[in-house]
Image (cartoon, rainbow, N blue to C red):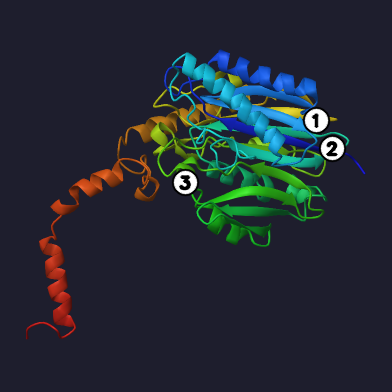
Amino acid sequence: MPEKITLSIIKADVGSLAGHHIVHPDQLAATTKVLAEAKQKGLIIDFYVTHVGDDIQLIMTHRKGVDNPDIHGLAWEAFQAAAKVSRELKLYAAGQDLLSETFSGNVRGLGPGVAEIEMEERPSEPVITFHADKTEPGAFNLPLFRIFADPFNTAGLVIDPKMHGGFIFEVYDVYEGRSVKMNAPEEMYDILALIGTPGRYIIRRVYRKSDGLQAAVVSVERLNLLAGRYVGKDDPVAIVRAQHGLPAVGEVLEAFAFPHLVAGWMRGSHFGPLMPVPQRSAKVTRFDGPPRIIALGWNINKGRLIGPADLFDDVAFDETRRLAQLIAEYMRRHGPFMPHRLGPEEMEYTTLPQVLEKLKNRFEKSEEVKYKVKHTEMLSGGGEG
């Protein structure tokens, strides 16, 4: 039986240079040292350390499966090393995503985001890892739907016999902590009814219907729900396998050619366009944004990470970036007003509840409401004749 390889992305914000702008090189060096020692000992096969904005990204391959305590413990150790550097340099928000002082066998629920996929390597195993900053996991809903269910994006859904049967979407409810598997194209409208609310329902995994092969996975951790207070949006990551009966790399990337609006941006409280950028532009400036995403292309060879290719480093995405800039300009002109600012249900962990509490005794019932109550009583026969 072919040997299974696990690809893990574990990310965290443990401090950054000049606000939420960018990771400091010494932080990357500290995490690289920890992972290099683990590779030498044989715990992991290969690794790559990078960042998007203020989030450190650990990309690792190993043979231990998903949710393995040794791998998650290694990531925790690496982030602690980076947080130590953050504190020594007095970087901003040192240790922000580490919600606990102790490791309990799994980083899920402790702050870092996790996307892992266990696979049997195909004769050629092209994989794309996506890394986003200043947004939430639901930002992947629209592009993943287009990749695996929209024939106007993915021609292979029509012309590739291995894809023509469609895909299974596992949709996760972040509020209830439960998921449902739904079939596309048969249940396409039902899928859209859920994932059109990306703050709650998130595409977590995608499987090929014909044989159950897992094609994609998204990190679904939401820090504010874990911490009970605003500690930043969740800066999600995703893994998408490509080619050989799955969407081609070009079809996967095509889904990001439209910079759709996502929640996050400044203080995690604003809608803005998701801008696909090359690694060198993986930093946030204007209004701590706008939200952005990088795509790294790999081939996995017996667990070795061959690559990466910086897939958004292409003039073909210049128009997408230009449109994102225009959308960002338009949204910013709204200032603190919706639809730029998130709705009240998403402002639960900001100062809005404190403002409402302070003002609660100053609200008075208006004359319009008093008249409405009286008018209703009269119509129901309870008022004066």
First in sequence, mark 1 or 3: give its number.
Answer: 3
- Between 242 and 365, the one lying in front of the other is 365
**Amino acid on which disc 2 is placed:** Glu
* Helix, strand or loop at mark 3: helix
Q: Are marks 1 and 3 in contact (CB under 8 Å)?
A: no
As measured in the structure, the alpha-carbon distance from the residue carrying label 3 to the one carrying label 2 is 36 Å
Q: Of tags 3 and 2, which is closer to the observer?
A: 3
Check if mark 2's residue and mark 1's residue have beta carbons within 8 Å.
Answer: yes
Residue 7, position in %: x, y? 74, 35
Image-quadrant location for residue 194: bottom right
Name above or below for residue 165 compared with residue 259: below
Which image quarter holds the C terminus? bottom left
Q: State whether residue 60 is above or below residue 68.
A: above
Q: Which mark is residue 225?
A: 3
Residue 346 in picture, x, y percent from top left? 40, 46
Q: Position of residue 70 (x, y in %)?
A: 71, 34
- Residue on which disc 1 sits: 300
Instruction: For marks 2 and 1, give the CA distance.
Output: 8 Å
Q: Which mark is residue 326?
A: none
N-terminal of the pair, mark 3 or mark 2, is 2
- Residue at x 76% of width, y 23% of height: 39
Q: Which residue sits at x=88%, y=39%?
A: 3
Q: Amino acid at mark 3?
A: Leu
Asked if one can make out residue 39 in the rendered structure from this viewpoint, the answer is yes
User: In the image, residue 303 lies at what x, y percent?
Assistant: 81, 30
Mark 2 closeness class: few <14, some 14–19, many ≥20 residues within 10 Å: some
Residue that badge 2 annotates = 121
Residue reaching furthest to the right: 1
Q: Is residue 365 above or below residue 227?
A: below
